[in-house]
Amino acid sequence: MSYKEAFESAKSDPEKFWMEAASHVDWVKEPSKALFSENAPFYEWFKDAQVNTCYNAVDRHVENGKGDQTAIIYDSPITGSKGKVSYAELQEQTAALGGALQAQGIEKGDRVIIYMPMIPQALVAMLACSRIGAVHSVVFGGFAANELATRIDDCTPKAIIAASCGIEPSGVIAYKPLLDAAIELAEHKPETCVVFQREQLTADMIDGRDVDWNASQVGVTPAECVAVSGDHPVYILYTSGTTGAPKGVLRPTAGHIVALNWTMKNVYDMDPGDVFWAASDVGWVVGHSYICYGPLIHGNTTLVFEGKPVGTPDAGTFWRVISEYNVKALFTAPTAFRAIKRVDPKGEFIKKYDLSCLKTLFLAGERADPDTIVWAQDHLGVPVIDHWWQTETGFAIASNPWGIEKLPVKLGSPTVPMPGYDVQILDEAGKEVADGEMGAITIKLPLPPGTLPTLWNADARFKSSYLDAFPGYYETGDAGYKDEDGYLYIMARTDDVINVAGHRLSSGQMEEVLSGHPDVAECAVIGAADALKGQTPIGFVCLNSGTEKSNEDVIKECVGLIRSKIGPVAAFKTALVVDRLPKTRSGKILRGTIVKIADGQDYKMPATIDDPVILDEITAALKAIGYPKV
Ligand code: COA
Ligand code: AMP
């Protein structure tokens, strides 16, 4: 089948297309049909089925005689340790932890927060939850206690599973004090915390609440896989929105299994048994879909890598891992390649390893700049496939459909919409624009299986965030265009989401935090172009009159405030004290114009600007700290 045929068949007969994809899943009770539209615009797929995610990701492979195959490879250059977990061992481990959770009173539908670094136990925790029908919510380790508290209050977990620490190049990061502080801050209190003690740091335990990962599993009955209905949430994953409160993206069980299994072959061209490596983190959607669930459901071997592309110990780490474990496809964010290229521009480390096993490099998470793609192509000698998706969709909206048909690569484009996604570029009035013209990138409803049906406990917010702007369409929040061959180009966000090192952050949320500083009268945060991270945030703060502190002190406090309230992941290191912010006459801050100044781009003087002189002041302030940088 060609790409066009696959795309058309998903469009003209979605029932047939997705029921065929569903036939590769092991059901407890098969779905009677694919799409359930009765609660539209909340679309649901395979709703009347009964199924279990962990069974499909683990047990069925053991039952099919693949128990000895490696499910997870663990490689941690940062701690100097390595290991392998077979499918049979993974079954044992998920059953044991699932049994321990059940013994703590966790049942189908209960929420469990997971706060763990890149160790195999993070996957065991996710799978153990899905084994017993509990709904997990993984929180990235680089978030501060306050962010963890927000998520605790939103999804009200009965239990939290955490590791004692994470390990970053800067040193050991104690997770347990962050967890304790978050529970202290939150209104909702979990009943149990299961703590995995790493050898690098033993956490203090709180009597009556905390239980040890190993001890909790002793003597418990191993958990069977609990059947759940097709629409049961397998997980909630929080992502940045326009305001400080993160959005809880809900992932439905059945569509998730069907779609991820389908993508492993059709998008990534992987066959069962192949080694797939997504160099990301379990805290992000890439980690959910392609470190944990996708490869395991499809019977691949997945890689849990605890390290960075550079500095752990050098810019050859990725190549060492690829050759050592026979990796067939690598998936990472362009920023990882920019980091490697900066340290090793000639690719000297690449030459030291036999990379003949590597067939493809997939990039996502942020715009893939042509320089990075060309560098990777030239040095690795494999096709570099940019693909575009988001937390909400859980798998690629647009990609080169590598397992269906290898389409010509066009630099700067993540290629074409995947089957199931009717992507349309609309103008402000909701009319489709001509080829080559920029507009809001939307997807005609319904979205395909595996995508979010709604937000956790927030149907109204789901509608206002995604559906209200263009009735009948899902608004992706990205702007871009299609060319005459139907290739998509993703150019910018239409909201205040910024993308720092492939991490999605909200500049609006950072502004909320800065506004909380007692000396800040008003502020703006923008994302400025950065040669390594894609974008980095810059804060502009105006101080209350009569402030006695020096500008330097206020800046230091602002940087500290974002780090303590949002976390180190925000990479907020630069703030400027300015007298005034450029605004329209109606008082709207001209953030877009500030971005253009910071990036050294030409800009048109906004017709509605209140006082043009302020732009000169902003330009001078940025110049004083070395902007524009790129
Ligand atoms: N736990 C605790 N802290 C964490 C963390 C975690 N899991 N992950 C990151 N942090 C901290 C870092 O230590 C750093 O703190 P610092 O300010 O004290 O140095 C901060 O958060 C920013 O981290 P990071 O964005 O990783 O920046 P970096 O400068 O350490 O590394 C890159 C830059 C490009 C090497 C790195 O971002 C990278 O490898 N990116 C790959 C892309 C990726 O995984 N994207 C995910 C989506 S696909
Ligand atoms: P996240 O939800 O964290 O995965 O972030 C999703 C957002 O990252 C998208 O809406 C885009 O803005 C951006 N993004 C992801 N992949 C790409 C890509 N291949 N090209 C351009 N932008 C991308």
Image (cartoon, rainbow, N blue to C red):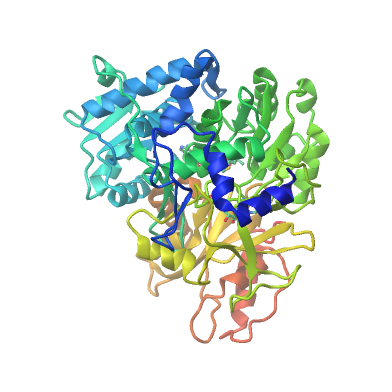
User: Residue 378's spot in the image, x, y percent?
Assistant: 83, 37
Q: Is residue 584 left or right of residue 403?
A: left
**Quadrant of the rendered image containing residue 247:** bottom left
Q: Residue furthest left?
A: 208
Which quadrant is the N terminus positioned in? top right
Q: Compared with residue 600, is residue 90 higher up or lower down, i.e. above or below? A: above
Whether residue 216 is visible here, answered yes or no, is yes
Most foreground residue, 561 or 484:
484
User: Residue 192's spot in the image, x, y percent?
Assistant: 23, 33
Total labels: the figure holds 0
**Quadrant of the rendered image containing residue 329:** top right
Most foreground residue, 59 or 359:
59
Most foreground residue, 413 or 309:
413
Residue drawn at 52 percent across, 28 percent down = 296
Residue drawn at 70 percent across, 42 percent down = 338
Whether residue 205 is visible here, answered yes or no, is no
Residue drawn at 30 percent across, 19 percent down = 222
Q: Compared with residue 12, is residue 237 higher up or lower down, i.e. above or below? A: above
Q: Compared with residue 247, is residue 338 higher up or lower down, i.e. above or below? A: above
User: Residue 578's spot in the image, x, y percent?
Assistant: 52, 70
Which quadrant is the C terminus positioned in? bottom right
Q: Is residue 550 left or right of residue 215?
A: right
